[in-house]
């Protein structure tokens, strides 16, 4: 405690020497980290672009990023150079005023890693310090690049155990003389951790594990893990790893000198499968504060004790100061997946507020005295039968950055109010190394009736008896950008997005503007105080990432990364720009008096699925059913089999693909394209069964599409129910 107090005093001293402006009032002409300022408020002090002139916003310059996947990073601008990151950890540098490309860097990535990438081969940003650009590649190598040339100064492997499903999608964070980075993969077989590397050499300085290891293997790495062990069953599924991967928010706090980390969900999902006797399973789904010098934990606050629902606490954090209960306090604002918006004191993790921002039925509220949720197992424990749980595992909030506007005190971000159907998948589940080990199925229910139509009647009957079923019928899903009073959780204004898969990051400015994109391809400018729409620009490319703003030579610019992808990326909704147009990844930069945005090419018209080969001898209806089951437990997370998916629609395989099917699945023929090899998990028989299922599906699809063609109807039908595990 004394130690914490001392570091606090040191932190506050630094604060009074100059950290205050950046932390409390947002970024200025520079935007020094993906969050903009030290508080990661995604708020700018710039005021040149206003409600009066926003109507004249147009394109200043654009850059083709050379990829076609999801773009989630917020660029950084330092000394007139714009740095940004993209697919698998590519990095780019541009002259921020002219758009002239200074360099681009593509890491050499072993694409076998893609087998444990739940939510697209994305990257959420880079860090710039001491003349170097730090970017973490998808396969868990940190690259320190020369900021002037993009040349590799050093690279360091930060994966602890490459036999597991660890990968990396988050932005590194600078904390003193270390760069801190998390990892992803809690859906697979990981034991989560954050790693700190020396800024100059890349040498490992410390590693902090989110969850304990099997106690049979000896003492835990730290006293805080020994304490955490008491909250796990001694016979937990240590083989699966426990999860907890901190895949997004890691914020260094210059006021306290601490690094705050948001930790991930439990693995496997169901608490009773992971830790049979229950327990809080620390430090899953928590905010933890670490000392960046030692890597030791100072405090923790668990938002979802014993996480049962993929309720990660990895979502972005915002640091600011607020007057609460008559005291001006350093606070962190945090809205994780679980549906609450928390305000904690950054010094000690004390809970100050916790208000629901969407419908929640897993908890009836948060007890302010204990800080613990009041659970409702009858409504939300799906291990006793299928349940519709609010909010859905997509999260009330997810990685899309929110912004805090200090003038109005509003927290503005994309909010999804929706439930999902969760149930245990039947049958024994052998452990799958570098495979999905969730044991639970998730079905999103924007249309709960349609979702149930795919199931046997008795299953549907059980679901229809749930009060949450009526609730899902009454109000299926609300997806909005909302301005929320963080002290009460109340929405001040809200703007609907195009649908539940349409969420984006948000920027606010001191001139009273709120700016965000949509997967429809539109960029919106609204008045922060009221939500009034001031301008929209149709770019033709889906926007999920947060816009940012900077100024060079007296001109203010707004920049945003564009490209469809992320969680659920194979399921492209009709309203996504990627449904109609090529998903050309672009960096788009706007200014007052700019030009119209040129749009990517329209996608080629659909053609009827080609004739599949005949089934192999010996294939029976049973083979096809077995293949379908294997397909859903291994392949469906990436292959939606929808005509506009950005992964191949396997109902449209050409003869050469059918011929090479075994080599593609088992021998890694297409690993460089991101299709991993599966020979350790799928036998020749399994592979052939999956192939039989796909041949059957292709034949049915072809028949349906020929009929549609004959009737003059469009070939793309309604989008399918989404079954996923992310
Ligand atoms: Ca997850």
Image (tube, rainbow, N blue to C red):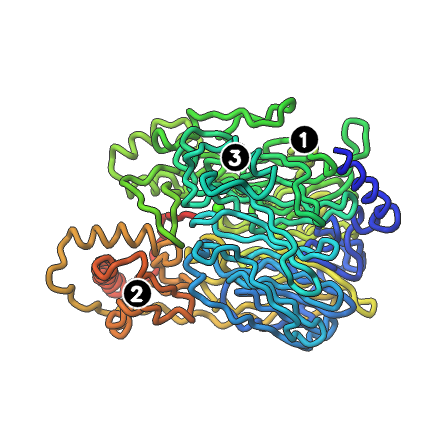
Label 2 vs label 3, nearer the camera: 3
The tag on residue 666 is: 2
Q: Which residue is mark 1?
A: 351
Identify which residue, 706 or 114, lies in the foreground: 114
Identify which residue, 404 or 678, lies in the foreground: 678
Q: Which residue is mark 3?
A: 229
Residue at x 77%, y 30% (from the top left corner): 324
Would you call the spot at circle 1 few (<14 residues within 10 Å), some (14-19), or many (20 or more)? some
Q: Is residue 74 visible?
A: yes
Across and down, in percent, residue 327 comes to: 81, 30
Across and down, in percent, residue 337 comes to: 54, 41
Secondary structure at badge 1 equals strand
Residue at x 35%, y 47% (from the top left corner): 431
**Quick check: 437 left or right of 518?**
left
Vertical position of residue 723 compared to residue 34: above or below = above
Calculate the distance from the C-alpha at mark 1 to the C-alpha at mark 2. Answer: 50 Å
Specify the quadrant of the image occupied by residue 615: bottom left
Comes first in the chain, label 3 or label 1: 3
Would you call the spot at circle 3 few (<14 residues within 10 Å), some (14-19), or many (20 or more)? many
């Amino acid at each position: 405690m004394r130690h914490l107090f001392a570091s606090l005093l040191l932190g506050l001293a630094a604060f009074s020497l100059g950290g205050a402006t950046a932390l409390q009032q947002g970024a200025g002409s520079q935007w020094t980290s993906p969050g903009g300022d030290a508080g990661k408020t995604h708020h700018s002090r710039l005021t040149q672009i206003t409600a009066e002139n926003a109507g004249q916003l147009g394109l200043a310059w654009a850059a083709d990023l050379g990829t076609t996947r999801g773009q989630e990073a917020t660029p950084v601008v330092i000394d007139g150079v714009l740095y940004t990151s993209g697919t698998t950890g590519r990095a780019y540098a541009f002259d921020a005023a002219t758009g002239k490309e200074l360099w681009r860097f593509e890491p050499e990535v072993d694409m076998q890693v893609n087998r444990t990438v739940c939510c697209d081969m994305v990257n959420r940003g880079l860090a710039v310090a001491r003349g170097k650009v730090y970017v973490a590649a998808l396969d868990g190598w940190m690259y320190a690049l020369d900021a002037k040339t993009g040349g590799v100064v050093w690279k360091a492997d930060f994966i602890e155990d490459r036999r597991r499903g660890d990968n990396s999608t988050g932005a590194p964070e600078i904390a003193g003389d270390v760069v801190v980075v998390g990892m992803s993969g809690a859906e697979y077989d990981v034991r989560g951790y954050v790693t700190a590397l020396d800024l100059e050499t890349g040498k490992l300085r410390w590693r902090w594990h989110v969850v304990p290891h099997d106690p049979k293997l000896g003492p835990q790495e730290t006293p805080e893990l020994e304490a955490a062990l008491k909250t796990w069953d001694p016979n937990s599924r240590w083989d699966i790893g426990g999860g907890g991967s901190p895949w997004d928010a890691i914020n260094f706090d210059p006021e306290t000198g601490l690094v705050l980390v948001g930790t991930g969900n439990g693995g496997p999902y169901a608490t009773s499968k992971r830790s049979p006797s229950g327990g809080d399973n620390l430090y899953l789904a928590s905010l933890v504060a670490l000392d960046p010098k030692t890597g030791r934990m100072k405090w923790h606050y668990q938002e979802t004790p014993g996480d049962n629902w993929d309720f990660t606490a990895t979502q972005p954090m915002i640091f600011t100061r607020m007057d609460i209960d008559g005291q001006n306090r350093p606070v962190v604002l945090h809205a994780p997946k679980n549906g609450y918006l928390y305000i904690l004191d950054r010094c000690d993790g004390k809970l100050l507020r916790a208000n629901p921002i969407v419908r929640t039925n897993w908890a009836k509220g948060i007890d302010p005295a204990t800080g613990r949720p009041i659970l409702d197992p009858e409504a939300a424990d799906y291990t006793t039968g299928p349940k519709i749980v609010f909010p859905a595992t997509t999260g009330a909030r997810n990685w899309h950055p929110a912004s805090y506007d200090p003038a109005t005190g509003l927290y503005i971000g994309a909010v999804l109010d929706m439930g999902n159907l969760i149930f245990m998948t039947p049958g024994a589940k052998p452990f799958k190394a570098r495979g999905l080990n969730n044991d639970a199925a998730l079905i999103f229910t924007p249309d709960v009736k349609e979702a149930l139509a795919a199931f046997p009647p008795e299953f549907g009957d059980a679901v229809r008896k749930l009060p949450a079923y009526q609730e899902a019928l009454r109000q299926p899903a609300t997806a909005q950008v909302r301005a929320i009073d963080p002290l009460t959780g109340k929405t001040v204004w809200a703007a609907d997005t195009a649908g539940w898969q349409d969420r984006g990051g948000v920027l606010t400015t001191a001139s009273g503007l709120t700016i965000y994109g949509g997967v429809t391809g539109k960029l919106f400018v609204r008045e922060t105080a009221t939500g009034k729409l001031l301008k929209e620009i149709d770019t033709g490319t889906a926007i999920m990432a947060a816009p940012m703003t900077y100024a060079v030579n007296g001109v203010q610019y707004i920049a945003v990364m564009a490209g469809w992808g992320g969680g659920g990326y194979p399921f492209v909704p009709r309203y996504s720009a990627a449904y109609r147009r090529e998903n050309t990844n672009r960096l788009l930069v706007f200014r007052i008096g700019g030009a119209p945005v040129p749009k990517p090419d329209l996608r080629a018209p659909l053609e009827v699925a080609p004739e599949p080969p005949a089934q192999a001898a010996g294939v029976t209806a049973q083979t096809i059913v077995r293949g379908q089951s294997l397909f859903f437990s291994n392949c469906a997370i990436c292959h939606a089999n929808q005509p506009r998916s950005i992964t191949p629609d396997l109902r449209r395989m050409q003869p050469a693909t059918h011929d090479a099917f075994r080599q593609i699945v088992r021998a890694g023929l297409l690993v460089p394209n991101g299709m991993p090899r599966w020979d350790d998990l799928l036998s020749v028989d399994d592979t052939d069964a999956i192939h039989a299922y796909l041949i059957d599906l292709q034949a049915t699809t072809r028949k349906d599409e020929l009929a549609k063609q004959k009737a003059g109807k469009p070939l793309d039908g309604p989008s399918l129910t989404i079954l996923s595990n992310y």
